[in-house]
Image (cartoon, grey):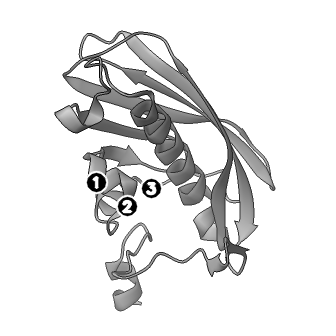
Amino acid sequence: MTTNQASPDLGARVNDLPGGWEQANGLRFLSASGDRVTAELVVGPHHRQAYGLVHGGVYAGIVESLASIGATLGVMPDGKRAVGLENHTSFIRACRGGTLHADAVPVTRGSRTQVWEVTIRDDGQRVLATGRVRVLILDAASTVAGGDLSIKQPQVDFTPDPGARERS
């Protein structure tokens, strides 16, 4: 597994991924690598439940997204992919608005599974939620739910320097 060298920051390229939960909910990646992922989400009316609080599913979705992306970016150089197996999200403090700031780091990175820990804070740096996600590392040819794991069009190049291929 390629983990000895510093991972390149691919946050801008992750933001270019087509569609999906992250885009639909306005999750914006600030940085992304196989070593750490940071993102933020500006709370809107569609993120709140009936009492006006940020819905727990928003926190769980952020936790899942950051952990899965971090794990995937860490194993992609080896031709592998990562898929979530477990998501344990704890809600610490209620929030009604502002910006959610999320930070994910790996706890363990094995050859078959990884565990990532995510912390979500408010604008005042108070912890709102924490979560741990266990991911399974798969070969690129593996299928999940009857389909392959390749990213559907448009294809996003996750090499550190996309122009390097053209120059070589």
The type of residue carrying mark 2 is Gly
Q: Is residue 116 left or right of residue 114?
A: left
- In which quadrant is the N terminus drawn? bottom right
Which mark sits nearer the N-terminus, 1 or 3? 3
Q: How many circles with numbers are drawn on the protein?
A: 3
Q: Which residue in the structure is indicated by mark 1?
A: 24
Instruction: Name the residue type under label 1.
Output: Ala
Q: Is residue 84 left or right of residue 62?
A: right
Give the side of residue 137 with respect to residue 19, left or right: right
Residue at x-position 35% and y-position 77%: 162
Is label 2 in contact with label 3 (beta carbons under 8 Å)? no
Q: CA distance from mark 1 to mark 3?
A: 26 Å
Residue 56 locus on image (x, y percent): 44, 27
Tag 2 near tag 1, CB within 8 Å = yes
Q: Nearer the viewer, residue 111 or 55?
A: 55
From the image, which quarter does the C terminus lie in? Answer: bottom left
Residue designated by label 3: 8
Q: Which residue is mark 2?
A: 20
- Residue drawn at x 53%, y 43% is 64
Q: Nearer the viewer, residue 158 or 130?
A: 130
| Tag nearer the camera, 2 or 3 | 2
- Identify the residue shown where x is 73% and y is 76%: 142
**Amino acid type of the residue tagged 3 in the rendering:** Pro
